[in-house]
Image: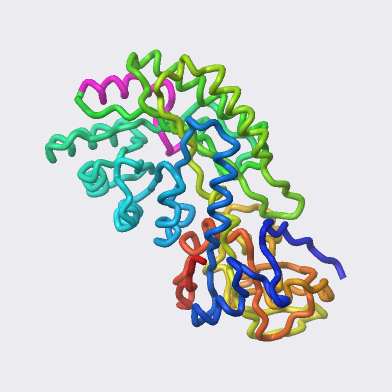
Amino acid sequence: MKTKPLGPIPARYETLDGELAIGGRKASALVEAAGRTPLFVYSKSHLDERVATLRAAIPPRIGINYAVKANPHPQVISHMAPLVDGFDIASSGELLMVQKAGIDPARVSFAGPGKRDDELEAAISAGVTLNCESEGEAHRSLTIGQTLGKTPRIAIRVNPDFELKGSGMKMGGGAKPFGVDAKRVPVLAKQIIAEGAEWRGLHIFTGSQTLSAEAITEAQTNVLNLAFSLTQEIGATLPKLNMGGGFGIPYFPGDKPLDLSAVGAALHELVEAHGAALGDTELCLELGRYLVGEAGVYLCRVIDKKVSHDQTYLITDGGLHHQLAASGNFGTVVRRNYPVANASRFGEEASEVANVVGCLCTPLDRLADMAELPRTEVGDLVAVFCAGAYGASASPANFLGHGPAAEMIV
């Protein structure tokens, strides 16, 4: 029987009494503590280690910003607060989340191409930096600031002429709804400064989810060169440069982890070569998925096992309403298997081929196709890895009325 390989399970997950263990606790114990499945579990130790490893690789002067959109769970935000230097948000809802976590608004920047006036007002009132994405948005921000009697903190998100090669989502280069075309930036920046706003610099985000160190290095070099060029045309010092991110994680069979040491070495060379030109400019990377993606596991339970036309189906109480990306319905053209395992028999060898599906009445609800797994029975827990980013908050939890999954951090 033809099989389809599973994606690579991230490192650092262990087996305890034959089960998958997260944070030193067995999957069954975590489910018991939560009181139900499906369940997202986020590992504090994975988060800690990822940030520490990243910091050790990159130059000390480069800060780390957490993109809240990747995982806005309140406990994840709170855990990341002392680990990172800043937070990037994309809505007033995310602004409220970081405020509830007690995060200083001075550490927060707000991007997104469709900020409403009420969102701009909330951000300006709080003292958040606005990464403005159009001339219209910048002028609205200035007007709102005057009405409030509050000086807005404004950066410009730049739409560069280049892109991040190999990116899963290209956010720069050519016509885009994101940012201000590079050639239009100097005029807008001069207007912002002349109107008395607090000039906060440039945000140049070219794309996301690439596993190529060479592509990331090329993009970062281009970002710095563009920032220098624009700064000269603007004629004012550059307070901050958000260099974007793009660091990917392995999801699919054949994917190899990003060579962080190569990225770090190239960043060291860039910073050393351009140190004088950079002056006191604050540098940061904006990362989401890379920081939290591998720290999350989605647990669901097998509620039925059936055979149809000689194929075995493991039907779970989970599905695409919580894990849209794992089902192959979140931007992928050809569906490939995420890393999936039997969490109840984590240490056992594969002995059967099965399709793992969800509980929704749609053929799109698939978690693994023709996967080699240990013999799995009704009641076993299935784990979908790389579930720490764009899972619970990026999936249609209300589809067919099944509701959201439980979430916990351990």
Colouring scheme, one of rainbow, by chain, secondary structure, one colour? rainbow
- Residue 346, horizontal then vertical, whole percent: 73, 72
Picture layout, residue 249 above or below residue 15: above
Is residue 98 something that shows in the picture?
A: yes
Q: In this view, does 2 lie to the left or right of 402?
A: right
Magenta span dominant secondary structure: helix
Picture layout, residue 386 above or below residue 239: below
Residue interval drawn in magenta: 176-194
Seen from the viewer's position, the closer of residues 90 and 67 is 67
Q: Which residue is drawn at 58% across and 66% down?
A: 23
- Residue 135, horizontal then vertical, whole percent: 31, 30
Is residue 175 something that shows in the picture?
A: no
Q: Quadrant of the N terminus?
A: bottom right
Picture layout, residue 38 above or below residue 143: below
Q: Is residue 185 magenta?
A: yes
Picture layout, residue 18 above or below residue 134: below
Q: Is residue 208 magenta?
A: no
Q: Is residue 248 left or right of residue 396?
A: right
Q: Which residue is drawn at 68% across and 39% down?
A: 259
Q: Residue at x 45, y 47 (%)?
A: 67
- Residue 190, horizontal then vertical, whole percent: 29, 20
Q: Which residue is drawn at 85% across and 66% down?
A: 2
- Residue 384, horizontal then vertical, whole percent: 63, 66
